[in-house]
Amino acid sequence: MSFGAYIDNTYHPIYRCFQSVTNSRRFCSTDCLELFESGPKKYVETPHPHLVEASGAVLPRLPYGRAKGEFDIDIEDPASLQEGDRVSFSKVITDDDVRKFAEATSDTNALHLNDAFAEKTRFDHRIVHGTLVSGLISAALACFPGLTIYISQNLDFRRPVDIGESLTTQCKIVDELEDDRYRLTTRIENDADEIVLDGTATVLIDPLPE
């Protein structure tokens, strides 16, 4: 089965800090209150009603803040992952993404943040942090049913990524290992279908907690 979805959420997860009290229940915002009121039975009886659903599978993704992107899954049986199952995630890397990543990691390399400096480098302009680009692999892995845990990742950076580029990450299971572990190919391409990053990963995929 194949499923595609678009993520563009301006509301926060139900457990966030701002509280609005109604009928003895507390909500982080009026958006979350409206979300609850759209299907109260679901939010009372379902273990994790805030997670994303896709074609009968529950994915460990939250509708979080202003997070954006498109994902697609092509999985034969969500209850039993196997060789050939794949997921993809697409996103435009913005200047705001780059600056927030620099703040979060303290990677304030001028190549990524200062135009005048970057113009004098081999790249002639600012580029996206390599580890911000590779982070899209983690975003894609969160599209597999279950809870994906990184074990290892090998990366080969093929070309720089410009700010404003649209990237698509593809992760495909190529080997089923023991103890719920899988080996995957991981590839990121730009909107010109050029490979910007290539590699392999080993992951552990647990069932979602009850």
Image: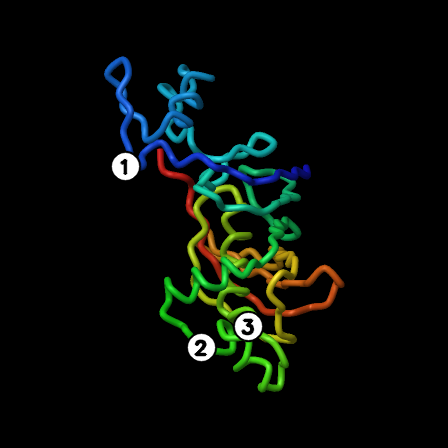
Between marks 2 and 3 in the image, the one whose residue lies nearer the viewer: 2
Quarter of the image where one finds residue 172: bottom right
Tell whether 104 sits left or right of 57: left
Q: Looking at the image, is 20 positioned above or below residue 142?
A: above
Q: Amino acid at mark 3?
A: Leu
> Which residue does the image show at 51% across and 78% down from the upper left?
111
> Which residue does the image show at 65% across and 39% down from the upper left?
4
Q: Amino acid at mark 1?
A: Cys
Q: Position of residue 100 (x, y in %)?
A: 43, 60
Q: Position of residue 171 (x, y in %)?
A: 60, 56
- Say if mark 2 contacts mark 1, CB within 8 Å: no
Q: Earlier in the sequence, mark 2 or mark 1?
A: 1
The residue wearing badge 3 is 155
Q: Earlier in the sequence, mark 3 or mark 1?
A: 1
Helix, strand or loop status at disc 2: loop
Crowding at mark 1 (Cα within 10 Å: few <14, some 14-19, many 20+): few
The residue wearing badge 2 is 109
Between marks 3 and 1 in the image, the one whose residue lies nearer the viewer: 1
The residue wearing badge 1 is 17
Q: CA distance from mark 2 to mark 3?
A: 21 Å
Q: Amino acid at mark 2?
A: Asn
Instruction: State the residue in front, 142 or 8.
Output: 8
- Say if mark 2 contacts mark 3, CB within 8 Å: no
Residue sticking out furthest to the left:
24
Q: CA distance from mark 3 to mark 1?
A: 37 Å
> Which residue does the image show at 58% across and 60% down from the upper left?
184
Quarter of the image where one finds residue 186: bottom right
Quarter of the image where one finds residue 23: top left
